[in-house]
Structures are given as structure tokens and as C-alpha cells.
Amino acid sequence: MKLQSNIKMNKGTRRKKDLKKKEDEDEGKIVLTKDMLLKGLRDFGLQDSLKTVGYRKLLLSGLGLEFLKSVALDYRSIQHIDLSNNQLADFQQLATFDHLVYLNVSNNKIKHINYLAEEDKLPNLQRLEAQNNKITELPLIKAPKLQYLDVSGNSIAKYERIEGGHPALTVFKANQNKFKSLYFFKDMPKLREIHLADNMVAAMNDYENVPELRVLNLKHNKIEKLDEDLPELPNLARLCLKGNKISNKEYVRKLVQYPALKRINILENPVFDPGNEYAVHEVVMMNTKLAKVNGVDITPTILQEAIFLGDLQWRKQEEERIAKEKEEKEKADREAEKEAQENNK
């Protein structure tokens, strides 16, 4: 018992020394002071997780902060922290805030969020906003209660699947990064939204077991072809593929067959000519249950026109089929007659 106690004390001492060393290195930078911290405290009341009374929010946005300093450690019971629009390179001092539920570090100079990969760090964090930073790698997320993660506007090109998936993640946003696939998404039973606009995704595959997914935003990527069998998405309701490279209408026909799909956007794909005024109708012909196509609400009039055009298209195809069969039959008859005449000579 004494040995364990000494180990814990040594770890705590090392942590304090590391923080002190970093503070010394950051001397001359704009650091968080006690006065700034006190002015940022908000929402005094009952802290549910602790069943005590205290401040629940800390608002420190737009102060030009470059370093937090260990003064923040005196308020580890805080549940909501806003550090957006500063100059921070990391948020190491917050990694031990066990009661933190919401953290906003957007528009800083954060280089990594590796604290999410440690078992004992940020155990109650539910929402992290870290967009517009300098993050290049997405760690294996361990934060067990994390529901909302926004890392848009970074340079993330490296990521791995989370072993065993993630039990709570509901919304994932990583627009404007360097994702090349959907490989990251596996065994996420509560995931409802994926936002990967302006990335480098080349295919709609590699994801597995995301049964609750309702929104898939892959706007402005590099998707050109679809696999013959797409992974199942039984609850997908909104799909955005605007600005990709899809050129085959059969791929569009396959996409609109998701059973719960209500909205789809495939503008700026070569599959439809920009001047095609009936592009929306053509998509509706493939699935008359759609509510919105390419940003256009499907009114009863559009639906009726699409059904009419679909019927007209079917009639035309039937006429072409019958004419072709007739032509082939006449050709066969002529060849048979010619062959019979030659045999009678």
C-alpha cells in the first residue's frame, strides 16, 4: 500500500514539475492569469457530477492566450470551457478535468488531441470543438462519453480505426481535411452524422456497422465509382455528394435506393449536364419517395411531372425495344429466306 502511495505521489510530483517546466519555457507569452480566470467564471450553481455548489462555466474566448498555466488546475470541477479564438498550441492543463463535459478550443494553434486517446483523461467529455487548428492526426478516441466531435478545418490525413468502435459518438465533423476514405468508421452504434465535405474521399465503402447513420455529407470529394454492393445504411435520410465525379446514372439509381433516404444532392457531378432542366425529375423517377433533390423541394407538381416523364421515357424505351426486335426479326427472316433460296439451287 505504501509503495502504491509513493508511486501516485511520484506521478503527481512529476506532472507538476512537467507543467512548471513548460511554464518556464513559455515565459513571455500571453498566459492565463488568476484575474482573467476569475473574470471568465460563469453560471454559479449546483454541479451535478459533484453534488456541490460552484461555477460550472469558464469563458475565455478571444483573449489571445498562448498558454494556460497551472492556475487553471484550481477549477477542475468546471464542466463547460470556451477557449476559442486564442493562440493555444495544446490544452494539456485540461486533460485532468474529470468533470468537463464541453470544451471549445476552435480557432487556435492546437497540434494534436491525443488526450482523447488516454483511458483516464477527460472521462466525462461529451462535446469537443477543435475546428480550425493545426491537427494532422486523429487518435484512437477513448473518451467514453464523447458524443460530438468537430475537427473541421485542420490537416488530418492520418487516422486509425478505434478498436471495438466507440459507444457514444453521435456526430462527427471533419470538413476541410485530408481524409481519403471512410475507414475510420466502424462499430459506432450511435453515430448519426458524418460530415466530411472538402476532403479526398474516393469511394463510399470501408465503413462498417453504423446502423443509426442518418446524415452523410461527402460534398466536394473525389468519388467517381461505386462498389457493386454498398454497405447497408438502413436509416440514412440525407446524402450529399455535390461536387464529386460521378458520371454514371446507374450509380445514382443505386444511391437513391437507401430505404429511408429523403434528401440527396448530386449537383456538380458529370452525370447530369448543368443545363439539364429535368435533372431533378430524373432522380425523382428513380425514387418517388424523395422529399428534396439538389436543394429543390419535391412538390406534388414536380412529382406528377416526374411520373409523367417516367411514363414517357418508358414508352419511348418500349417503342425502341419493339422496333429493335422487329428489325432483328426481319433481318433473321431475310437471312433465312436467302439461305433457303441457296439450298434450292
Image: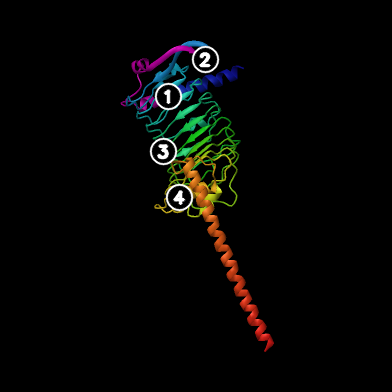
Q: Say which quarter of the image contains residue 1.
A: top right
Question: Percent position (x, y) of residue 335?
Answer: 62, 78
Tell me the tag on residue 279: 4
Classify 10 Å Cα crowding around label 2: few (below 14), some (14-19), many (20 and above).
few
Taking the image as drawn, is residue 21 in sight?
A: yes
- Helix, strand, or loop for circle 4? helix
Q: Which of 73 and 182 is in front in this view?
A: 182
Up the image or down, 309 lies above or below 64; here it is: below
Residue annotated with mark 2: 48
Question: Percent position (x, y) of residue 200?
Answer: 45, 47
Residue extending furthest top? 53
Q: Which of 341 and 132 is in front in this view?
A: 341
Q: Which amino acid does label 2 sit on?
A: Asp
Left or right of residue 198: residue 62: left
Q: What residue type is labelled 3?
A: Asn
Question: Percent position (x, y) of residue 293?
Answer: 47, 43
Q: Do the residues labelled 2 and 1 touch (CB within 8 Å)?
A: no
Residue annotated with mark 3: 154
Residue annotated with mark 1: 19
> Which sits earlier in the primary sequence, circle 3 or circle 4?
3
Between disc 2 and disc 1, the foreground one is: 2
Point 43% across, 32% down: residue: 130
> Which sits earlier in the primary sequence, circle 2 or circle 4?
2
Q: In 3D space, how far apart are the residues under numbered discs 2 and 4 (Cα atoms)?
A: 54 Å
Between disc 2 and disc 3, the foreground one is: 2
